């Protein structure tokens, strides 16, 4: 049975990674799960300088999901290279770092510093987080700015670049095409959906940042739809994500056109979720007589 | 390897206004746990995906049982309140930092407010057992008589207990900070409860020049330190930073925190 997939020329031993921001850089969940067994691991967002993050509360639950605004709290790229990259390197899997910025210069700075420092296999551009203090990132909502950030980052790195896109964009298909034209090597679909909740006793928004990103099983159908649409218009591979809780969800993404998938919020529900997904995919392939997971990619597209 | 485990519900009963007394059997995990830590408990309802961080009220290491006293205030804890003996709940833990006890201290002030009271019971028990010659004074504040919990349990381990209620229906009317002795006399103060109570306790400790240890709470998602949701402001040189309540805390030295 062949489980390995190729994303932008990088071989993953299986099609599973973690979604950015859900396992930090792996340290905290390492007592619970052997990350060596995954196809890749994707870090939290890393910015140029320290970002202090959003006001509390940063998270609230909603039916079948959660809304969070962390605001990409991190110590900046130099601290990441010092503290996190050595740990990342020790994990025997493909390492992906999620790159953030307030402007395109900051994305380029982070990308070039990570490239110089070495030890990283791929970069994922977070141009679509809906949960930033001061309002959502708009770069990924517009095809023109998406094209510009991808083109400029590609110019400063030789690492494969994955653009992470948002269904909050007016037309995710146009944005995906723009990212591909600008040289993106792969796409991550989807980021969280812009959302909010109100505390009816206090008559105030629940989250400190007012708005956050909705994740979890509630958003899966939106994510499947996005992958299905985008897979038909781009040639670059898609990493599908958004509410994957179990193998059946992951298989839906693959059939919709994703070459790989990421497990995010499910890590909070069960730290072993990503490995359970992997085992479930193997069981599905056995049951359906599928020898190569790549044969399932896009198989449901009409 | 650590794992998400299923703990058997031994009992889960209402003991006061919205407050439930839950006993969970998990012998291996109880063995590792210390006063001040918490468990992240799943509701069992798949529409509520996140676990609820619940502080540990008592550890029965012989029986292999956690005692958790929690308020069923939100949707998730109301769901947990439906569990009956024989049910199983998914649990992560024990998690977070524990209360440190220094045997050089003899005179302890323990200050709890509302649903912040439970973790102080295991702390009191631990001090009683580990610190010979200790004198433990407990100051517990509640909204009303109907909310008063664990008084009889504390009496087993402490020398002096003072209860206040906001409306005066039980104990002294007013808040528990107001009944702390103005002359002091304590070697250390421990607190768990609303931030405003902790803030005034920290000020009391500062005035008396004694250490103050507080246990805090914040909305959590992963509860193991990965998601960065449950943060609290601490001093960092001349600046400040958010640190994680679930793993850097929930127990902090009050001097580290920035009170707003």
Image (tube, coloured by chain):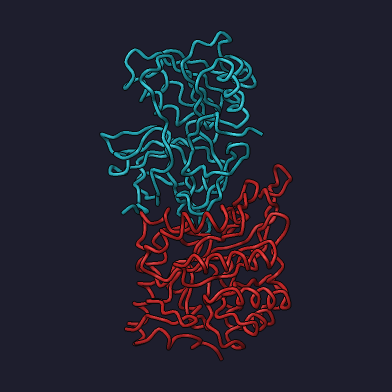
Chain colours: A red, B cyan
Residue closer to the observer: B63 or B55: B55
Residue A169 location in percent, x, y? 70, 73
Residue closer to the observer: B9 or A152: A152
**Position of residue A112 in the picture relative to residue A33 (left or right):** right
Q: Quadrant of the N terminus of chain B?
A: bottom left
**Position of residue A192 in the picture relative to residue A139 (left or right):** left
Residue A146 location in percent, x, y? 68, 75
Residue A248 location in percent, x, y? 44, 74
Residue at (73%, 46%) from the top-left corner? A204
Q: Is residue B9 above or below residue A88?
A: above
| Extreme residue in the front direction | A116
Residue at (40%, 64%) from the top-left corner? A89
Residue A280 location in percent, x, y? 37, 73
Tell me, yes or no, if residue A69 can be seen here: no
Q: Is residue B260 above or below residue A40?
A: above
Q: Quadrant of the C terminus of chain B?
A: top right
Residue at (52%, 55%) from the top-left corner? B48
Tell me, yes or no, if residue A148 can be seen here: yes
| Extreme residue in the left direction | B62
Q: How many marks?
A: 0
Figure quadrant of residue B168: top right
Residue closer to the observer: A3 or A226: A3
| Extreme residue in the bottom direction | A302
């Amino acid at each position: 049975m062949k489980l390995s997939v190729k994303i932008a020329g990088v071989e993953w031993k299986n099609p599973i990674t973690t979604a950015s921001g859900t396992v930090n850089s792996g340290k905290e969940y390492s007592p619970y799960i052997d990350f060596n067994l995954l196809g890749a691991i994707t870090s939290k967002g890393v910015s140029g300088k320290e970002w202090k993050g959003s006001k509390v509360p940063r998270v609230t639950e909603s039916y079948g999901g959660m809304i969070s605004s962390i605001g990409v709290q991190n110590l900046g790229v130099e601290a990441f290279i010092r503290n996190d990259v050595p740990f990342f390197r020790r994990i025997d899997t493909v390492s992906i770092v999620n790159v953030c910025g307030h402007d395109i210069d900051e994305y380029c700075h982070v990308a070039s510093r990570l490239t110089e420092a070495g030890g990283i296999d791929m970069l994922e551009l977070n141009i679509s987080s809906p949960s930033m203090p001061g309002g959502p990132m708009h770069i990924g909502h517009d095809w023109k700015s998406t094209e510009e950030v991808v083109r400029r980052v590609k110019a400063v790195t030789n690492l494969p670049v994955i653009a992470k896109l948002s269904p909050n964009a007016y037309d995710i298909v146009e944005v995906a095409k723009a990212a591909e034209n600008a040289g993106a090597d792969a796409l991550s679909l989807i980021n969280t959906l812009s959302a909010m909740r109100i505390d009816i006793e206090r008559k105030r928004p629940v989250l400190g940042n007012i708005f956050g990103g909705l994740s979890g099983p509630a958003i899966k159908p939106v994510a499947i739809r996005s992958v299905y649409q985008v897979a038909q218009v781009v040639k670059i591979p898609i990493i599908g994500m958004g509410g994957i809780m179990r193998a059946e969800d992951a298989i839906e993404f693959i059939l919709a056109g994703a070459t790989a998938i990421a497990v995010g919020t499910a890590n909070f529900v069960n730290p072993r979720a990503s490995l359970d997904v992997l085992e479930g995919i193997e069981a599905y392939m056995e049951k359906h007589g599928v020898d190569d997971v790549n044969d399932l990619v896009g198989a449901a597209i009409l | 390897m650590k794992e998400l485990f299923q703990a058997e519900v031994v009992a889960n009963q209402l003991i006061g206004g919205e407050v439930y007394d839950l006993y969970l059997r998990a012998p291996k995990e109880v063995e590792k746990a210390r006063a001040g830590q918490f468990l992240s408990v799943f509701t069992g309802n798949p529409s509520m995906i996140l676990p609820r961080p619940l502080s540990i009220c008592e550890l029965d290491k012989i029986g292999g049982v956690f005692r958790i006293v929690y308020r069923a205030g939100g949707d998730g804890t109301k769901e947990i309140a439906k569990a009956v003996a024989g049910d199983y709940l998914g649990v992560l833990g024990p998690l977070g930092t524990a209360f440190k006890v220094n045997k050089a201290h003899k005179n302890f002030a323990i200050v709890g407010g509302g649903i912040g009271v439970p973790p102080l019971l295991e702390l009191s028990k631990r001090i009683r057992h580990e610190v010979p010659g200790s004198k433990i004074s407990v100051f517990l504040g509640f909204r009303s008589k109907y909310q008063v919990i664990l008084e009889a349990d504390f009496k087993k381990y402490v020398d002096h207990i003072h209860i206040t209620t906001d409306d005066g229906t039980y104990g002294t009317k007013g808040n528990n900070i107001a009944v702390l002795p103005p002359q002091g006399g304590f070697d250390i103060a421990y607190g768990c409860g609303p931030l405003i109570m902790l803030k005034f306790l920290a000020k009391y400790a500062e005035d008396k020049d004694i250490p103050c240890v507080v246990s805090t709470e914040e909305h959590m998602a992963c509860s193991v330190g990965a998601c960065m949701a449950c943060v609290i402001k601490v001093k960092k040189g001349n600046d400040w930073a958010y640190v994680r309540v679930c793993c850097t805390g929930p127990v902090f030295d009050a001097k580290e925190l920035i009170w707003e």
